[in-house]
Amino acid sequence: MNGQWTCPHCNSQNCRHHKTYQTGHNGTRLLWRCQSCNRLFSETKATLIEGLRKPTSFIIQVLKTRTEGIGLNAACRAFAIAKNTLLLWERRLADYKDVLIIYALTHTFIEQLIEGDELYTKVNRNVPPEDCEGWTIVLMERASRFIWALQCGKKDRSLFSYAIQILRDVILRTGDVTLVTDGERRYGNLLFEICHEVLRTGKRGRPPKVLRRGVKVRLKNKGKGTDRTGHSRPKYETPHPEHPETDQDVTPADIHANHLEASNASFRRKNSAYRRRTNTYAKSISGLQRTLDMLWIVHNFIRSHFTTKQVPAVALGILQQGLSWDEVLRVRQPRLYKY
C-alpha cells in the first residue's frame, strides 16, 4: 500500500498504512504515516467530511434534499440540524466546483454547440430588474447538457465577462465551437473582444479582425427590433465577422436555446431561491451563488440527465462514469483547506 496516499503536510507519496481506528458513526477508518515527515493523517484529511461527526449517509441525505429544491430553513427543521452546520456542509461542497472545472478544462474536445441564456430572481430586496443582482448566466453544451458557466450577479459587463472568459478557455480546448443565444448580443460582443484574431490577406490597408478559426456565434432576435439605422433586424444574425476557413454548418433551425430554457425550468424547481413564494427569493448574492455551485456539481458530475440518460460529464467525455455522493465527499482538496 506504499504510495497510495499523498501526505497533506509535505506532498510526499511515500506513505504507509499505520493503523485502523473506530469512529462514532462512520465505522472504521485508516490512519496513514508519511515516511518523509513522519506525520500521521487520516484518510478524510482535506476532504469535505474532515472533522465532521455526523454520519456520511446523513450528510448526503441532507445535501440531496437541498439540491432537489427544499429551502435552507426547511431542511434544518426537517433534519433537526443547526443552520450554521448546514451552511458549513454547503460551503465545503460549493468550494469543490473550482477543482472540477479545472479538471474539466484539461480535456480536449472535438466540437461543442453551446447555448447561452439568463435566469432571474430577486436578492435581498425588491428592486428594478436592471439593478438586481439575481441575474444568472448559464452556458450549456447542447448534446451532453454539460453546464460550463452558472454565475449570478448584476446584469452588467462584469457578469458577462466572467462567463465569456470560461467560454474562451473552452474554445482553446475545442476544435469547433458554436455559441447560440436568444437575442442577447453581449455574448457575441464580449467574445469578439477577447477571442478574435487579425486576418492577414496580403492586401493593402488595415487587416480586419475576425473570430478565431472554428468559432461561430449565432443570434436569434426575438420580437421586432431595429438596428441603429432604423432597419428591422433579421431573425437570425451573425453579430461579428468570422474566419473564412470556419465551417458554416449552422442551420437556422439550430439557432435557439430551447434545451437550456427547459433546463432553466428544472433549475427553478431544484433551487428554492428561484421559486416565487416570498417577496424576496434570495437573501444574499453569496448565498445564491453557493446554491448554484452545488447545483453545478450535482448536475454535471453526479445526477443523470433525464433526456440523455447519462451524467453530463460522461456524455461530454470528461469522465468514464459519474461520481457518487460518497466519492465527492471523500475527494481530497489540498488547495482549499489549511492543515
Image (spheres, rainbow, N blue to C red):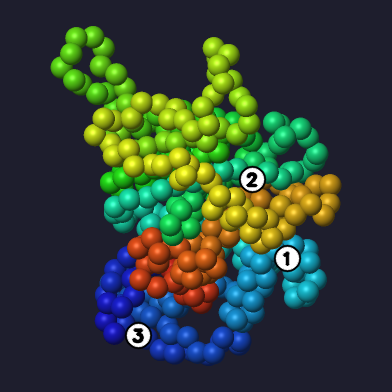
The kind of secondary structure element at disc 2 is: strand
- Residue occupying the far top of the picture: 205
The residue lying at 37 percent from left, 50 percent from top is 112
> Residue 233 versus residue 169: which sits nearer the camera?
233
The residue lying at 59 percent from left, 50 percent from top is 261
**Amino acid type indicated by mark 3:** His
Q: Residues within 10 Å of mark 1 (few under 14, many from 20)?
A: many
Instruction: Please name which of the two marks, 1 or 3, marks the residue nearer to the observer.
Output: 1
Question: Are the two marked residues, 2 and 1, in contact with CB atoms closer than 8 angstroms?
Answer: no
- Compared to residue 96, the image places residue 192 above or below, namely above
Query: In the image, residue 295 lies at what x, y percent?
Result: 58, 60
**Amino acid type indicated by mark 2:** Leu
**Amino acid type indicated by mark 1:** Ile
Label 1 sits on residue: 70
Q: Which mark is residue 17?
A: 3
The CA span between labels 2 and 3 is: 49 Å
The kind of secondary structure element at disc 1 is: loop
Question: Are the two marked residues, 1 and 3, in contact with CB atoms closer than 8 angstroms?
Answer: no
The CA span between labels 2 and 1 is: 19 Å
Mark 1 or mark 2, which is nearer the start of the sequence? 1
Query: In the image, residue 1 lies at what x, y percent?
Result: 29, 85
Q: Which mark is residue 119?
A: 2
- Residue occupying the far left of the picture: 202
